[in-house]
Amino acid sequence: MLVGIEERRLGIGRLLLKAAAQAARTAGCGSLELLPTSDATDLHEFCHATGFGKTGLRFVRPLRKG
């Protein structure tokens, strides 16, 4: 998933993430993983703001509470 620079900060990324999380849960997945291709500060901030935790080079977000 990628949101163009001009369209960022409009909630599009959160909507895409919500849809991806719902589809993953339906498929039986327990978490989402993000493998960033760069050290973009705004991407890291987005990950932390949307519930991802950093694990090594990737960000992981559990889909189920508990």
Image (cartoon, grey):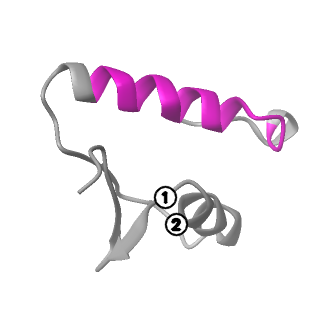
> At 67% from the left edge and 72% from the top edge, which residue is drawn?
41
- Label 2 crowd (10 A; few <14 / some 14-19 / many >=20): few
Q: Earlier in the sequence, mark 1 or mark 2?
A: 2
Name the quadrant containing residue 49: bottom right
Q: Is residue 41 above or below residue 61?
A: below
Amino acid on which the number 1 mark rests in the picture: Gly
Q: Which residue corresponds to the image point at 50% horizontal and 30% vertical from the top-left?
A: 18
Tally of numbered discs? 2
Of marks 1 and 2, the one in the foreground: 1
Asked whether 33 or 25 is in front, the reply is 25
Quadrant into which the C terminus falls: bottom left
Q: Main SS of the magenta segment?
A: helix
For label 1, the crowd category at 10 Å Cα-Cα, with few meaning under 14, some 14 to 19 and many 20 or more, is: few
Q: Secondary structure at mark 1?
A: loop
Which residue, as the protein is rendered here, is positioned at the far bottom?
A: 56
Furthest residue in direction left, as rendered: 28
Report the magenta residues as a range.
8-24
Q: Position of residue 40 (x, y in %)?
A: 63, 68
- Label 2 residue SS: loop
Depicted 58 relative to depicted 51: above or below: below
Q: Is residue 32 above or below residue 49?
A: above
Query: From mark 1 to mark 2, how far is it between C-alphas?
Result: 19 Å
The residue located at (56%, 73%) in the rendering is 39
Residue 61 % position (x, y): 35, 55
Residue 46 placement, left or right of 21: right
Q: Which residue is label 1 attached to?
A: 51
Question: Which residue corresponds to the image point at 40% horizontal and 70% vertical from the top-left?
Answer: 53
Residue designated by label 2: 38
